Image (tube, rainbow, N blue to C red):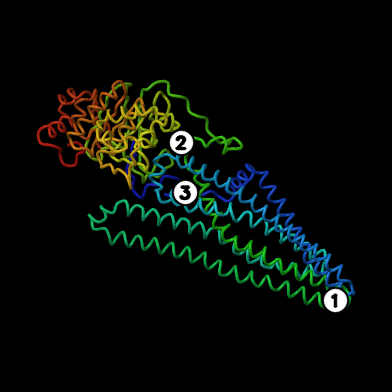
Amino acid sequence: MTATATRPGPSEDPLPGGAALPVAGPAATRRAALRLIRRDGRAFALMLALNALAAGAGLAGPWLLGRIVDTVRAGGGVRTVDRLALVILACGVAQLLLARYARYVGHRFGERTVARVREQYLDRALALPAAVVERAGTGDLTARGTSDVTSVARTLRDAVPEVCVAAAQALFLLGAVVVLDPLLGLCGLGVLGGVFVVRWYLRRAHGAYLAEGAATSALAELLAATAAGARTVEALGLQERRTAASERAVERCRRTRTRTLFLRSVLLPAVDVAYVLPVVGVLLAGGALHGRGGISLGAVIAAALYLRQLSDPLATILFWAEQLQSSGAAFARVEGLGQARQTRPAPAALLPHPSPEASPAPAAPVDDRIDVTAVHYAYGGGDDSRSPAAHRDVLHGVDLTVRPGERLALVGPSGAGKSTLGRLLAGIDAPRRGSVTVGRVPIAALDPAVLRRQVVLVTQEHHVFLGTLRDNLQLAAPGAEDAALHAALAAVGAEWAAELPAGLDTELGAGGHRPDGSQSQQLALARVVLADPHTVILDEATALLDPRTARHTERALAAVLKGRTVIAIAHRLHTAHDADRVAVMEEGRLTELGTHDALVAAKGAYAALWQSWHSHGPPEGSDSP
């Protein structure tokens, strides 16, 4: 099967509020994160427990060192000092082992959770309607599935364990200083002055990183579109315009990244100062208290060491603060994919609680009849009745019934709405008003797996995936045997496949066999044969084949599709001549409907097209040569 259509114009917004895919809000992102934690709650709880034990073991060192100082000042013996030193060593080893195992558990938790995020993202991306993907652009979808998912993965794998360890250590160290002496504890709490700087940073960082991600997506989309259309850009002399657009996109990326860099440049120096001041305060206050006999020298040393140790976990937390903000914005973009209009629900494993807003699954079609009733459609309007009037209708009140097993040809001049109607019939888009149903069920509401068994749209666009010839064919029928694959290739006249060096195991694409345009289209048509739908919509599906090969392929398809419904958007009028009925589209309206002979006899628009093609070739501006 092929790609379904060209991308609409840039002014067409696929989703409310803009052309990009949605971004999840803070509340939705938090709920998604909690769902992921609950999925592996035992590992998360074990990670926290191990971190707490490791932090507790780490408290012994400074306290025992203070005891050693007091013991020496009091004239204690070497044996006592050695015993305390051995306890310090044992506690240090215990802390090392506990922290190592805590990180091991944390990394395993992170990897499992990352796998769920990737699987969920892939499922949601595949569930997106084709129209949403086309209008949002592949750049945004690609950026979310690559850099954003990678950022989330790094956070779950590395940042979460490190931050949990550091947070436990920081809490235990502050608590230990307070236990030693409340006044020294107050001095130690001065380290929390950095919290105000962090709050200032966090209030600005989320939006700044979201803007950076959006700018990156826009740049990726622009570069991908320019690379894909490089020949067109060169042919039309658009190099300077595309270069200027790329420079503007790069400049926008630079500005957004400079903004996040500025935020970091304020945060990090301020926090460094916050580390030093509490230690200085404890030494000054502790010295004064010790001079008055209010506290032992060992307690002052222990408190200073605790606060000195506090800088390491806080540095870890602040080091990951930037990554947490960046990945938080990335996770909001990844999770936002779930808010785009889906055509099928996510797997039950990813939905711990049924959503009360979930709409019931549509009923199964009762038969193969397709009904188009009073259909209006405007690009950018979709199925939203609140669309602004600025989205001008391209289809106006179209009524059509396609009977099971019928061969219907759609003809008309360029821009008449034939391909748009084909997209509605294939369930890619939903009408703005009116209905398009199969077996009394709206086509656009069908689950993709069900829709594929009902209707398949084949256009002149096509795609060959990296992999073997067998892999490419089994996309349409995963369980198909080799005999069925060979039969499908033979049905569309793809004799070239039999001459490949490794047969069905031949690699296609870079490093293997590179199919030309006609071979790629025959491969797409073979997928249709394997998909075995009851209705096939051919939108200039043989346009890239030379006339002789196209005629041969169409005859082969006619034999295979016998008994099925075929809707052909005619590129060559012999297709209309062979059809059971012909529907003529003009300016978004269905103006004529009938058999070839009846329409020729009526001497209307179809008769003019037929006469022009039959006598002189295609009229200018027509899709039908």
> Quick check: marks 2 and 3 in contact, CB under 8 Å?
no
| Label 2 or label 3, whichever comes before in sequence order | 3
Query: Which marked residue is nearer to the observer: mark 1 or mark 2?
Result: 1
Residue neighbourhood size for the residue with mark 2, other residues' Cα within 10 Å, grouped as few (<14), some (14–19), many (≥20):
some
Q: Percent position (x, y) of residue 259?
A: 50, 65
**Residue holding disc 2:** 343
Q: Is residue 358 positioned above or below 7 on the image?
A: above
In which quadrant of the rendered view does residue 306 lie?
Answer: bottom right
Residue 140 lies, in percent from the top left, at: 43, 51
SS for dot 2 = loop
Q: Nearer the viewer, mark 2 or mark 3?
A: 3
Can residue 588 be seen?
no
Near mark 1 (Cα within 10 A), the count class, few <14, some 14-19 or many ≥20, is some
* Residue 595 sits in quarter: top left
- Identify the residue at image location x=55%, y=66%: 263
Q: Which residue is mark 3?
A: 145
Secondary structure under the numbered disc 1 in the rendered image: helix
Up-down: is 97 above or below 608?
below
Query: In x, y percent, where is residue 498?
Result: 27, 33
**Residue under pointer 1:** 290
* Other residues around mark 3 within 10 Å, as few (<14) / some (14–19) / many (≥20): some
Q: Which amino acid does the dot numbered 1 rest on?
A: His
Left or right of 232? Residue 440 is right
How much space separates mark 1 and mark 2, taking CA atoms?
Answer: 72 Å
Q: Tell me whether circle 1 and circle 2 mark residues in contact (CB < 8 Å).
A: no
Q: From where the camera sits, is residue 264 visible?
A: yes
Q: Residue at x 44, y 58 (%)?
A: 215
First reached walking from the N terminus: tag 1 or tag 2: 1
